[in-house]
Image (cartoon, rainbow, N blue to C red):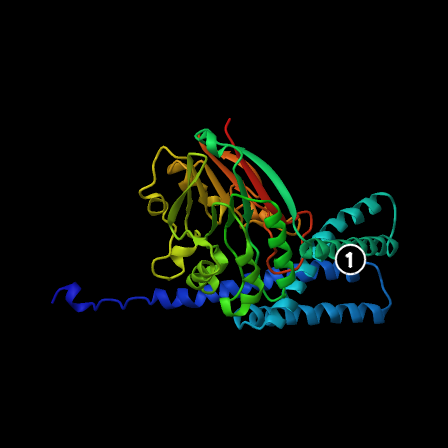
């Protein structure tokens, strides 16, 4: 008998089950660390860093932070995992409050260091820092709420397009995006937005996705005013990533029912004064991984059959889809998704994932990208140093 015959093969190591167990463990540890920082830094700065507050005040403040920390994941699960709007409203608001406190508590420690250099001792140093952080946070939270709930300002942008025909010079496109109809009922706000859009007398009105958080049945009343949007040539819509958390096809069908043209990897051609323009749209970048059959961004399909000599305006929810737009010779891509960061300084994190956060940028030899800061807001009802917008883009011949 040979050695190979005498020694039985070692059993295979079950690697896959171990990995399956490791993933939720790593996720849990990461989430715990993030929550500890978000809640811990404000708690330490406001209460525990040498201010020596009276014991009842310290105990009450600590209890408040502890209850908020314990409640937050439960509220987010019930709100966004189980569809309970009351929990989503509460959890989202708590997220916004703790983010603002975290940011300004972290910055407040620079003030603490400056006071230390200036010879201010504790508890005065820590109490001045805590008071400054509290006042700045309260002011920004109040202002941010007003900014989030107000009618968006109209942002006017002129876009030169080299291939634009003479009959299209001055064509007006209104861009809406990231309305995020959600757990806070904003049907009245939606009606005011539509009235503002109609006052702009647009040739084309576009919505580049993230129309709602929830199903058509849940958000029908908030979306209803979109049926009253007026445009001379076309009203067009593409999906955003949030549609793929719910019912993307349902929103495509509903927007068609409201009289819009869903550009689900397709295009249409509009004409004015003898000149023509291709208006195309692609699904969101996340559509392919959503598991929904027939949903994925497909620029080739969207432009199939289009005259290659005509200028192209492309609707694509995420700015990072601009690479494919450049490859397909698109003249102008309209996007949203970033919210301009929504709550400062979150734009720094957004920039890690997207080529731009807001405004008009140039990509390649031909393609321009306009990224809107968004018409509504996601989650926390706050906008801080990132105002919402209704965008009026006027196309110009160079």
| Above or below for 190 versus 64 | above
How far across and down, in percent of the image, does residue 179 sit? Answer: 57, 56
**Which one is nearer the viewer's eye here, 150 or 121?**
150
Circle 1 residue: 138
How many numbered discs?
1
Spot occupied by residue 213 in the image (x, y as percentages of width and height) = 54, 63
For this rendering, which residue is in front, 156 or 167?
A: 167
Q: Is residue 347 visible?
A: no
Question: Which residue sits furthest left?
Answer: 1
Q: Is residue 53 visible?
A: yes
Residue 291, above or below 164: below
Up-down relation of residue 103 to residue 257 (above or below)? above
Give the left or right position of residue 252, taking residue 79 as reference.
left
Label 1 secondary element: helix
Q: Is residue 120 left or right of residue 381?
A: right
The outermost residue toward the top is 398
In front: 267, or 323? 267
Q: Is residue 36 left or right of residue 354?
A: right
Residue 60 position within the rendered picture, expressed as x and y whole percent measured from the top left:
79, 71
Label 1 CA crowd tier, 10 Å (few <14, some 14–19, many 20+): some
Q: Quadrant of the N terminus?
A: bottom left
Query: Nearest the camera: 308 or 55?
Result: 308
Q: Residue furthest front?
A: 273
Residue sitting at x 53%, y 48%: 336
On the image, the x and y values in percent for residue 364 come to: 44, 32
């Amino acid at each position: 008998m040979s050695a190979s015959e005498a020694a039985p093969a070692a059993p295979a190591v079950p690697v896959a089950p171990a990995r399956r167990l490791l993933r939720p463990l790593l996720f849990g540890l990461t989430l715990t660390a993030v929550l500890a920082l978000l809640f811990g830094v404000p708690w330490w700065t406001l209460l525990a860093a040498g201010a020596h507050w009276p014991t009842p005040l310290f105990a009450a403040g600590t209890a408040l932070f502890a209850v908020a920390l314990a409640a937050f994941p439960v509220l987010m699960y019930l709100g966004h995992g189980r569809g309970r709007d009351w929990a989503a409203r509460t959890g989202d608001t708590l997220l916004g409050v703790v983010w603002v406190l975290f940011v300004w508590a972290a910055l407040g420690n620079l003030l603490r260091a400056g006071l230390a250099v200036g010879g201010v001792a504790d508890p005065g140093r820590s109490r001045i820092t805590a008071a400054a952080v509290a006042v700045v946070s309260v002011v920004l939270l109040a202002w941010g709420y007003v900014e989030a709930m107000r009618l968006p300002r109209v942002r006017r942008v002129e876009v030169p397009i080299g291939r634009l025909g003479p009959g299209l010079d001055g064509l007006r496109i209104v861009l809406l995006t990231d309305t995020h109809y959600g757990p806070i009922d904003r049907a009245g706000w939606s009606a005011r937005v539509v009235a503002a859009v109609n006052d702009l007398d647009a040739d084309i009105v576009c919505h580049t996705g993230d129309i709602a958080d929830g199903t058509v049945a849940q958000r029908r009343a908030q979306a209803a005013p979109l049926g009253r949007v007026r445009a001379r040539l076309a009203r067009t819509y593409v999906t955003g990533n949030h549609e793929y958390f719910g019912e993307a096809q349902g929103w495509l069908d509903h927007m068609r029912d409201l009289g819009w043209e869903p550009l689900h990897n397709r295009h249409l051609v509009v004409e004015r004064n003898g000149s023509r323009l291709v208006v195309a749209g692609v699904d969101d970048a996340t559509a392919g991984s959503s598991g929904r059959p027939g949903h994925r961004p497909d620029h080739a399909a969207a432009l199939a059959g289009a005259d290659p000599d005509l200028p192209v305006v492309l609707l694509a929810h995420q700015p990072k889809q601009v690479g494919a737009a450049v490859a397909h010779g698109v003249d102008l891509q309209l996007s949203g998704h970033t919210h301009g960061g929504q709550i400062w300084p979150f734009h720094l994190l957004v920039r890690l994932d997207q080529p731009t956060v807001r405004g008009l940028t140039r990509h390649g030899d031909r393609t321009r990208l306009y990224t809107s800061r968004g018409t509504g807001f996601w989650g926390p009802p706050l906008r801080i140093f990132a105002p919402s917008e209704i965008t009026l883009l006027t196309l110009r011949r160079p």
